[in-house]
Image: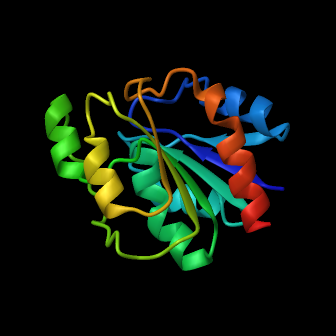
Amino acid sequence: MKIYYINGYKGNNSNKPKILSDILNEDINHVVYDYDKNNLKEIYEKVKDADLIIGSSTGAYLIRDFCFNNSVPLISINPVINIKETFNKIGVPVPEIPEHNFRKNIQELVLVTEDDELIDYKDTIKLLNNVKSFEDGGHRFKNLERVKDDILEFIKFIY
């Protein structure tokens, strides 16, 4: 199975791909989104053969339309749902990327933490389907290993 991980803002050195690789016992290809270069088209090209994409935070936001248009299942980890609001909170210019229509139905597992300091998990639950919430972990989703059963169940369901 070809699995790709798309990082969030400043997540270039994230340990999530390694943790997810251990959980799934599969290689995870970390495709780095460079916010300074805004290399979204390059990302789409790199993941065109994906069987599954995992996006964290802004990475989940960025890859959503690709997943919809190409029927690729998505696992979203604390996904950004309002790019302008989130980037304003962290005091960073909003990247020039397309707005999303979240009403698009895609095969997706959404993992959120209730103590996320950037994104209100309740808004995510209202907007997206198949959301699993966890009490703690913050925006970086500490203790990601605890979602193993949820991820494996999702993959079993879609394949």
Residue pictured at 55% horizontal, 61% vertical: 108
Residue pictured at 74% horizontal, 56% vertical: 155
Give whichever of 2, 94 is nearer the camera. Answer: 2
State which quarter of the image contains the N terminus.
Answer: bottom right
Give whichever of 45, 53 is nearer the camera. Answer: 53
75 horizontally vs 29: left or right: left
Above/below status of 14 relative to 83: above
- Residue 136 picture location, percent across and down: 42, 24
- Residue 89 picture location, percent across and down: 16, 34
Above/below status of 134 relative to 82: above
State which quarter of the image contains the C terminus.
Answer: bottom right
Q: Quadrant of residue 146?
A: top right
Above/below status of 23 relative to 50: above
Q: Quadrant of residue 2?
A: bottom right
89 horizontally vs 22: left or right: left
4 horizontally vs 39: left or right: right
Residue pictured at 46% horizontal, 51% vertical: 60
Residue pictured at 75% horizontal, 47% vertical: 152
How does the figure colour the protein chain or chains? rainbow
Tell me how many marks there are: 0
Whether residue 36 appears in this view of the structure is: yes
- Residue 22 picture location, percent across and down: 79, 29
Whether residue 93 appears in this view of the structure is: no
- Residue 91 picture location, percent across and down: 15, 31
Give whichever of 153, 96 is nearer the camera. Answer: 153
